[in-house]
Image: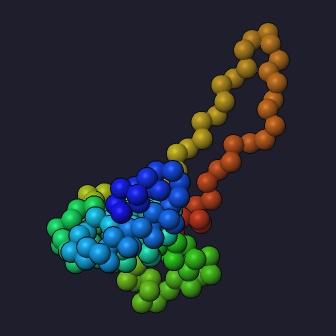
Amino acid sequence: MLAQAGTASSTGQKEQAVKLWKQAAEVYPADKSPWLSIAQTRYEAGQYGDAIINAQEVLVRDPNDTLANSIIAISGLRLSTRSLADLSRQNNLSGSIRTESQDLAKLLRESLGETVLVPPAATVQPPPPPARGKVAAKKGGKAKQEDSSANPFDALK
């Protein structure tokens, strides 16, 4: 079953692979590998909630699995980032939510050994001056600059 699921996954049939991994998990309930494959597939598809749930199944079977812990941590951060961005756009990041978010950001910065969680956007370099004796053709449009309000962690720095 695991081989069939691996083949289905490698040929792009992700949902078929997940079905096969779930069948394997039922037949071999102590095996963590089907759950880990499902968690990875869900993570790669951006289905972070499902990735977390399946990675937790791995940890039930092997509490020290580094990949499962990584999937949970990164998926959780991505879900949090989305939620903070939504709250920020709605101007609802205030009170205890704001305080708790700031505390979590501080903990993350300390854990990562960083002074900021999200580095500032790189500055756009001005184009070089046109060569002498030649008229430089102006390309249409300016370089798009990052909108700093789109970064949900700006308020937490």
Report the label total: 0
Please provide percent x and percent y for residue 36.
32, 65
Residue 41 shows in this picture: yes
Above or below 122: residue 118: below
Left or right position of 10 against 39: right
Task: Tell me how the rendering is colored.
Answer: rainbow
Residue depicted at x 25% and y 69%: 32
In the picture, residue 99 is in which quadrant?
bottom left
Residue located farthest toward the top when viewing the structure as drawn: 133
Residue depicted at x 81% and y 37%: 140
Residue nearest the observer in this picture, 61 or 144 = 61
Please provide percent x and percent y for residue 111.
25, 64
In the picture, residue 61 is in which quadrant?
bottom left
Left or right position of 21 against 59: right
Please provide percent x and percent y for residue 138.
81, 29
Locate the C terminus by quadrant: bottom left
Above or below 10: residue 43: below
Locate the N terminus by quadrant: bottom left
Left or right position of 130 against 25: right
Residue nearest the observer in this picture, 71 or 87 = 71
Above or below 135: residue 61: below
Residue depicted at x 25% and y 73%: 28
Above or below 22: residue 147: above
Residue 59 shows in this picture: no
Please provide percent x and percent y for residue 35.
33, 70
Residue nearest the observer in this picture, 64 or 87 = 64
Residue depicted at x 72% and y 14%: 131
